[in-house]
Image (cartoon, helix red, strand yellow):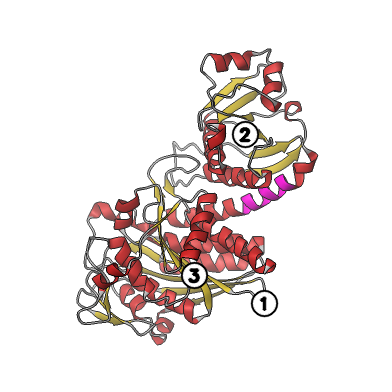
Amino acid sequence: MKVKALLGDPFALETDGLILTVYENQERWTGGLAKADRLLGGKLRDLQKWGEVRGKASEVTIVHTLGQMKPRRLVLVGVGKRDDASLESFRRAMGSVVRALNRIRARTAHWLMEATEGTDIGDLSRALTEAALLANYRYSRKTEGDTAPTLESLHLITLDRSARSAVEQGVETGTIVGEATNRTRDLVNAPPIEMTPTALAEAAVEVARLRSLDCSVYDEKWIEEMGMNALRAVSLGSAQNPRFVVLQYRGHESAPVLALVGKGITFDSGGLCLKPADSMLDMKGDMSGAAAVIGAFDAIGRLQPKANVLGVIPATENMPGGGAFKPGDILKTYLGKTVEIINTDAEGRLILADALAYAVNQGASSILDAATLTGAAMIAVGPVCTAAFSNNEDLLNEVTHIGRKMGELLWPMPLLEDYKKLIDGDFADIKNSGGRQGGAITAAWFLAHFVGKVPWVHLDIAPTFWSDREEGYLGKGATGVAVRTFVQWVLERSDKDREG
């Protein structure tokens, strides 16, 4: 689907659906709603009186115009109470609209952009564009009986000539970020027989080629030579060799280096501490953090911010083959710290240990990592929020604010010293598991050992990387979580560095 900005009168255009927003309990109709009601002889108001148009959040009512105007249908979508409406309200409304239009096999649609109190029209245009592209996404390998989305074009149309530039810019940025997020979803949704560590590295190389970025892919020999023994140990039970991927975007010669690090376990069986069969079903998504880094670089390469960004992806499978690492093993990491293996299913933190230490060694001034790290995070915050941990309160506040703005809710979690001792090692510096209690926190503390004093935020995306149902603007499968937060963080840091 293509999203475009348009200046003109929406009632003069032939379209499968003209989309108008309605607030809950909206008594006074103005603008597009008032004109549509007038053209239909007051019948829209009747629908409101009859309770068929209530303006409740994401509620969609389709009205056939029957030749009374050029648009074939009006699509009335609720955005909730005016005082509660936010960019996320409009994103979710767009998701409901796109699904409704696809159900009736519509091909074209126009959303009337009207001034919204307290909301920048450029930001709104971007949010709607992202939501439309995410909602229209579909991943399927079915050979028959499948119904693909039909919606081919969506125009955000404005009557206000002075708003045209902002709408165009919002659509452009939203398209770039939306498409990048969907690229990430493709990677995560791909079956693990295809999405091997090598294939994941090749996906990064392809993005680098398309966006003129630097990308280096290192093999198991290099990993061993660098002393990344934690990463190498996790890979030993698999027939697939590991890869270590380094992406670089250079947008400003003197800007600080911002690092994005992503966990790249392309399939997690649990290793010798084997997972139950049911728990393996979505473990093809254990590389969602890595995929988010690739998607973010796809967008960053197109947006060209005045920033320097380093991407680090450790990629491997965690399998129970004859060479697999074992409980009781002691590993020496890239940083030099030793780790006692308590549980081979706590492998993500091991590969991230080497990756985070590498990012610090490469001069990162601030680090964000994304990882499907713990089931404990899923218990702690449920499927709504990503759990966020940090060694720097200012950076944590910055990133959680950005996540909220982008529709990716982050919930700050405690990284208190009292939890740190739970992973003190008996025979090594630290151990890779502190047990079930506070599992997401002790996992974050493990990672904290490898960033030192560099400001860092760890996003445990285990609760949010996958959706089991259609909700808002996301369907079943991979969500592409963290891409929008990563990209916006880089954009806002770019703006701050230029101002400074």
Q: Residue visible at 43% across and 74% down?
A: 356
- The amino acid pointed to by label 1 is Glu
- The amino acid pointed to by label 3 is Ile
Magenta span contains residue 173? yes
Question: Residue 16: horizontal and vertical position, in percent?
Answer: 64, 28
Q: Residues within 10 Å of mark 2 (few under 14, many from 20)?
A: some
Q: Nearer the viewer, residue 263 or 159?
A: 159
Residue at mark 3: 367
Q: Quadrant of residue 151?
A: top right
Q: Is residue 376 left or right of residue 72?
A: left
C-alpha separation, residue under disc 1 versus residue under disc 2: 45 Å
Q: Is residue 142 left or right of residue 133?
A: left
* Secondary structure beneath label 1: loop
- Magenta segment, principal secondary structure? helix
Q: Residue visible at 68% across and 43% down?
A: 121
Residue at mark 2: 107
State which region is magenta.
166-176
Q: Quadrant of residue 78?
A: top right
C-alpha separation, residue under disc 1 versus residue under disc 3: 19 Å
Question: Residue 259: horizontal and vertical position, in percent?
Answer: 52, 71
Q: Residues within 10 Å of mark 3 (few under 14, many from 20)?
A: many
Q: Quadrant of the C terminus?
A: bottom right
Residue at mark 1: 253
Mark earlier in primary sequence (1, 3): 1
Q: Nearer the viewer, residue 192 or 215?
A: 215
